[in-house]
Image (cartoon, coloured by chain):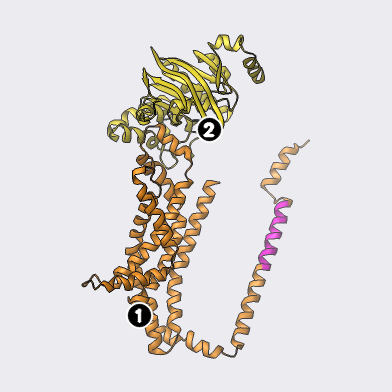
Chain colours: A orange, B yellow
Amino acid sequence: MPNPDQGGAAALSAAPTRREIHEARLRRRSGAIAAGSTLLVIGAIVLFVPMAPGWEAVRRSFFNAEVFRKTFPGLLEAFLVDVAIFLWCAPAIALLGLVIALCRDVRAPALFPLRLFGALYTDVFRGLPVVLVVYLIGFGVPGLGLPRPWNSPYIWGSLALILVYAAYVAEVIRSGIDSIHVSQRSAAASLGLSEADTMRYVVLPQAIRNVAPANMNLFIALQKDVALLSFIGPVEIFRQAGVYKSLLANFTPYVGAALIFLAITIPATRYADYLLHRQRRRQS
Amino acid sequence: MAKLVLQGVRKRFGQNLVLDGIDLTVSQGEMVCLIGASGSGKSTLLRCINLLEPIDDGTIHLDGVDISEPGYDPQAVRTRIGIVFQSFNLFPHMTAAQNVMLAPRRVLGRRPEEMAGPVEALFDRFGLKHRMGHYPDQLSGGQQQRVAIIRALAMSPEIMLFDEITSALDPELVGEVLDVLRQLRAEGMTMVLATHEMGFARELADTVCFLDGGRILERAPPGTLFTQPREERTRAFLSRLL
């Protein structure tokens, strides 16, 4: 007589089970529905948008291939300015954000002013629109009549970005510090580690790793906000696109600038999502 | 001479009196087991001895020095009294060896090259030499708990406290951790354990204390306490376990 257990095991490894067949059918069905509805929406857009009365004008002023070809290299070059501003702001933001976060965590009573400063700092700079800070610092400080190069809008514009983004990074790092379970601090204390060593060797490395995806999203936002510096002078990509627009009386350069931003931000956002997803999976 | 003396120790969490006048003496080389229901104050007592929790009343003397005096530097005490927790509390971002070497390096000022030999010997002694480079999440619960014990031992403590260190382990992993305790016992380590392993307490302890409602209700050698408990509540507790 055949052993029923063995028969069951063999069926499991060879032919698909009833459940697997059922699930495969469900998957095929939902795949077909998703593809169909997507095609429908795209078809509608392609069909109906050109029927709008102003479509021809929009196409000429926003999607002009010739203007695009002519201005794109210049835009790319201007984007290097954005990248450069980002590259010198990012480390300063990370450092200042860390310092502010640590200020808010000090326990010693003598250092209470630091704590107060940290709280005040994050409240003020998270409470202001970035563009306002860029204006205030970018126009205000050079207005003091400083000698060259200290009146450069690059310096003061960058400082504005650093100040604002450090406040956000500080809050993210602080939430990371709070997320480390108190038992980790207990374990470190029980080994005789000082509070400073506990923070440096036990809490911070874990905290910073935990909030890496959140910080990454902040830095993606920073790359976009570099364009705000165009208001106070630096000819970066947004400003350059504006120059082309005036020259050629055409908005296509803005579309080109948008594409260049997306080429950087979409992969970066996807990567941050991937990091977050990996972290969730590891913690579950 | 008495190594550790607790007198009238009281500890309150808000309205809740967790330790209600604990008197306990531990001699050099003695092994004391604390037994009792969950919430009877065993863990809190150990955390108070290690100064992880400040006590509200009473005194704790270590080698005749009052370490419970407010303002006494807890760090100095903690390097002399090691503690191992129920939930291991290894540092997850460090390898087993890094976990063990952090405190000697930062607190005792040891250099990594002078520690390498002794630390490896310590891992070898507890059968974990091949796991030194592993991260905690790559180790079984029993291995993690043994690393936590090695981490505490690396500070060369004079007293070791163990807070239900086998309670979070799968049954088949309890044995390897208890073996470590047997080994320490054979080497003459002064130990205080909170434990639910009655068989183990009976086999190795010099003294067993039964805690109930934050007091030591009964204190006796295991032979006496497990066979002829004096108090009715001790008897009730033990009969529930058997």
Residue under mark 1: which chain is it in?
A
Asked if residue B212 is positioned above or below residue A143 in the image, the reply reads above
Front position in the image: A177 or B119:
A177
Q: Give percent across and percent down for residue A210.
A: 46, 50
Judged from this view, the residue extending furthest toward the right is A1
Amino acid type, residue under disc 1 in the picture: Gly
A29 is within the stretch colored magenta: yes
Q: On the picture, is A148 further left or further right than A139?
A: left
Q: Quadrant of residue B195?
A: top right
Q: Give percent across and percent down for residue B147.
A: 44, 31
Tell me which residue sits at (44%, 30%) in the image: B54
The numbered mark at residue B13 is: 2
Front position in the image: B200 or B19:
B19
Q: Quadrant of residue B229?
A: top right
- Magenta part, dominant SS: helix
Same-chain status of marks 1 and 2: no
Counting other residues with Cα less than 10 Å from the Cα at mark 2, is it few (<14), some (14-19), or many (20 or more)? few
Tell me which residue sits at (54%, 49%) in the image: A281
Tell me which residue sits at (47%, 47%) in the image: A178
Query: For mark 1, what is the residue?
Result: A74
Q: Quadrant of residue A9?
A: top right
B6 is within the stretch colored magenta: no
Front position in the image: B22 or A68:
B22
Amino acid type, residue under disc 2 in the picture: Phe
Counting other residues with Cα less than 10 Å from the Cα at mark 1, is it few (<14), some (14-19), or many (20 or more)? some
Q: Nearer the viewer, mark 1 or mark 2?
A: 2
Q: Is residue A31 visible?
A: yes
Residue under mark 2: which chain is it in?
B
